[in-house]
Amino acid sequence: MLELSEELKKRHARDFGTESCKVLEWNEDGIERLILNIRGSHFTQYLGIPTDHPLAGYGYDEIPVRCHGGLTFSEEGKGGHYPAGFYWYGWDYAHAGDCIYFGIDKESVISEYGIDWTLEEVIEDGWSAYYDFKLLKELVEKIVKKIRR
């Protein structure tokens, strides 16, 4: 179970600086979870599956996962922000209805209306996508096991 301090939970993407960086990475039941800060503007969230898993390698529009704004990313990790050994599916928090920053000062707000996502809210929002992905992962594993009999 992921444990975070109250101070960390309340932070926004802009609180992590203007350079894109990894905010959190953890594993839940064989699914890697990753949250990035994109240039202090907004958060992005990803679910990773080992690259040799049958669910890896599909386009984001082929994966039926409920998440904020829909999946917008699918790619094999090659290091850096996206760790190697995993195929990543992700989404962002920079849609209409989201508060988006271009920098870290109030004058740099692109859209000050809408949700000004905290890290805690992003984590909470990601649970439905995680559960969908977990069910899909388990179904695919059962199908593969049945076929290989």
Image (spheres, rainbow, N blue to C red):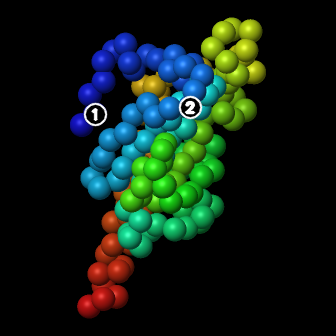
Distance between the alpha carbons at the discs numbered 1 and 2:
22 Å
Q: Which residue is the site of mark 1?
A: 2
Residue 82 horizontal/vertical position (percent): 48, 48
Mark 1 burial class by Cα count in 10 Å: few <14, some 14-19, many 20+: few
For residue 38, side relative to residue 36 (left or right): right
Which-is-in-front pick, marks 1 and 2?
2
Q: Is mark 2 on a helix, strand or loop?
A: loop
Q: Which residue is drawn at 57% across and 27% down?
A: 19
Residue 76 horizontal/vertical position (percent): 50, 60
Q: Which image quadrant for residue 95? A: top right
Q: Which residue is the site of mark 2?
A: 20
For residue 49, side relative to residue 46 (left or right): left
Q: Which image quadrant for residue 111? A: top right
User: Which is nearer the eye, 135 or 123?
Assistant: 123
> For the N terminus, which image quadrant?
top left
Q: Which image quadrant for residue 140? A: bottom left
For residue 77, side relative to residue 94 (left or right): left
Q: Residue at x 46, y 59 (%)?
A: 87
Up/down of 129 relative to 100, above or below: below
At label 1, which amino acid type do we have?
A: Leu
